[in-house]
Amino acid sequence: MGSYVYDFTEGGRDMADLLGGKGANLAEMARLGLPVPPGFTVTTEACQVFLATGEPPEDLDRQVGEHMAELERTAGKRLGQVDDPLLVSVRSGARFSMPGMMETILDIGLNDLSVLGLGKEPERERFAWDSYRRLVQMFGSTVMGVDGSLFEDVLRRVKEQHRVTDDSRLDTCDLIRIVEMFKDLILERSGREFPQDPAEQLRQAVLAVFQSWNGERARLYRRREHIADDLGTAVNIQQMVFGNLGPDSGSGVAFTRDPATGSPGLYGDYLPNAQGEDVVSGVRNTVPLQELATLDPGSFDQLRGYMETLETHYRDLCDIEFTIEHGTLWMLQTRVGKRTAQAAFGVASQLADEGVISLDEALSRVDGHMLARLMFPRFGFTAGTPVLARGIPASPGAAVGTVVFDSAAAVRRAAAGEKVVLVRNETTPDDLPGMVAAQAVLTSRGGKTSHAAVVARGMGKVCVCGAEAVHIDPNTGRFTAGEVTVSEGEIISVDGFEGLVHLGAAPLVDSAVMSSFEAGDRLTDEMAQEGVPEVRRILAHADAIRSLEVRANVDTPQDAARARRFGAQGIGLCRTEHMFLGDRRPLVEAMILARTDGDREAALAALLPLQREDFTGILAAMDGLPVTIRLLDPPLHEFLPDRTELAVRLAREEALGRTPAPRDTELLAAVTRMHEENPMLGLRGVRLGIVVKGLVTMQVRAIAEAVAARMRAGGDPRAEIMIPLVGAVEELRHVKREVEEVLSVVTRETGVHVTCPVGTMIELPRAALTAGRIATEAEFFSFGTNDLTQTTWGFSRDDVEAAFISAYMDKGILRTSPFETIDRDGVGRLVEIAVQEGRAVRPELKTGVCGEHGGDPDSVHFFHQAGLDYVSCSPFRIPIARLEAGRAALPVCGTDASK
């Protein structure tokens, strides 16, 4: 039977899979000789057994008992002894950081007798009862299942009776009374008494931490962060040290660099005469870490040295929790710190400058999701704009939304399509659903290391904490800030860059990073302050090492020019159907309604110069780069008025005794004739080109004439013609002959030799499975992964996303929507088959992807592995695709710095 328990002296940071991140890092600090309170870790394997069977491993109690006995020998006192008892904390610690998502229980070992021994000295009496109060409250809600708000209600009532707002203002008698009220509450609500046996407290606490792995907020967090459900959590059991023993004690959280901007220096919060949970919960407002240098210079100097040791050892920004007990510093936790997107790029670039890491490793520490956050807009205020409240800028960005005061309201309003701002005194882990739903989080308490700040930064949510002017009245559903009262449903604007709150909807402007892509090489002071040089540097390295080209999905010359500024290396998808809308719709209607070949040819002839002008502009904007033009794809009825709308219009006219307009009658007949039960699988794509005479010829002639015009003008046009929805090589062969004939005709007419590669979209399973045959005719493949996903899964995207994709993800059937991230096992397998079989026939076959998966960070890695030549996406996702293509090319791509 294997070991399920490891002493801190037995592990190290390379054992995070077994010991969890917290346990591995505690062991690492102990190995480095830092002052860590002694303790041990129950492994993730023990949790996995519990999750699978509902029972802990058979030998776990014995192993925990043996390590507990050793801890008692080290401490020189026993758990539960009456005179100065040993107390321990029980904390979760998963492989990946999940701040506040699972359970913690402090002060295990206190009971009705040992609390008297802990507080036998008069100066420690209040501390002892406050510790007992914390244990009963935590144990009651975490282990015994009593609603945590009921304990808060008791605490609030007692404070109101004494007219105090801070827990620290309650005296010993108040705390004794609260403990008894808490115990009565537990008995009333759970039917069980609070356990007096310390060993039983410990056992139940460990099992409660195991159970919290599958708690609602933990499951929600894992889904959002794409953390596997089968990892389980470790449990860390550690001797308690106390920061609430008086003015020479305290607790704090420190960062070796600013987690908001990445700037070098010491950052963090400190709270004198307080425990660690008081700091991170935000229930009391902290002081800046630098004030510790005045309060306790010796401990500050010691802490600064330990922080340097840890950053040097981990080669990264470190997040540290510490407690000072009567002037003695203890290190309680360290980890690679969560940070904002700007800080991630800044720290990675700084460490590369310092020679600590290579540029490859710097690239591995950022990702496309972070870059997307840096492209968020910000507020465009004029000088003197009134400020409703000021707080601490905890997570950057700009957000506008209606005020809500609880998580349930945030979720409900967001589901109805509203943008909301969650306003709380402080957040707790139970607020996670509301934080996910909200555009921003505003709290009246807490600092940069509070629960709200840490979770918001991890999710990329705008957050302002510690806005002390905000006074919330949950009973009336409003808050006041100075003379202003704001009710639920009113709109506010939250500025996570400056820590400001404004009444009403403030105007938004593009981020400096977004502006920098438009600005070329120009660099303004604002861009420099917001981390643009660091983004440019790492993005340039990604460009230097990536093998995937990045193209754009665009349909106009203006979008093509923007895409080029954003770094596009061509156009992977130019959708010609978008050129048939607007004021050109009547010409398309004329083509559809044509009764004779002559009428159809006339309509197509009218469209030809317009298409030629479109293609000429796009080829000019992308001069020297490939432009893949897809021939008309959607069914023709999409260019006609809605069938029901036409029928109602005609019926209304007849009911009024009027003769319907002949064109409406004609249009309804055409729409009815062309109606399909499932148009996605009907007359569209290549089928349309085969059935509608002259359509392919018109479009190809427009392309060829545009190429000829650009060549005569001295340009370097590189048009590629793509045939959509091919399912059989015979379809492609038929249309390709027509394409080549038109190219030959235009060559003779213009005297310019016009050649355009002809390829196809692979968007049907049959096309992927017969790719070897299709490659005998196709000069390139472009995977239309949107339709390929629909036809592989049998999903209608517009229907299933609204009907059940969310339910599938909630139930764990799907981890992500297959329309957002490529389904590697199904759709991805078809892509791999098509690439392999296509290149077996045509080794020089060019392959790419033009669905929106081309801009999804996770999908880009798959396309690199599958051997594609390029990805194509919307212009604003091009920088993200460039970054991820570089990361995909790294020998071993590191995990992102937010995990």
Image (tube, rainbow, N blue to C red):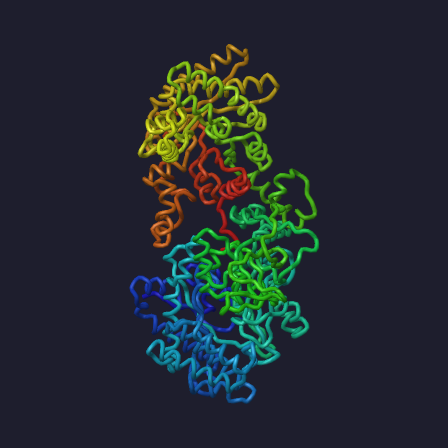
Q: Residue furthest front?
A: 657
Residue 812 percent across, percent down from the top left: 35, 53
Q: Position of residue 792 (x, y in %)?
A: 33, 38
Quadrant location of the N terminus? bottom left
21 and 427: which one is in front?
427
Q: Quadrant of residue 122?
A: bottom right
Identified at 46% across, 54% down, the residue is 414
Residue drawn 34% across and 26% down?
669
Image height of 848 relative to 379, above or below: above
Foreground pick, 95 / 185: 185
| Residue 105: quarter of image | bottom left
The image quarter containing residue 544 is top right
Query: In this view of the protein, which residue sits in the foreground, 694 or 772?
Result: 694
| Residue 306 shows in this picture | no
Rendered view: 137 above or below 772: below
x and y, in percent, of residue 756 in the image: 48, 21
In this view, the residue in front, 236 or 855, is: 855
Query: How many numbered discs, if any?
Result: 0
Task: State whether residue 508 appears in this view.
Answer: yes
Residue 339 appears at what percent x and percent y?
56, 56
The image shows residue 307, relative to residue 700, as above or below, that is below
Left of 73 or right of it: where is 387?
A: right
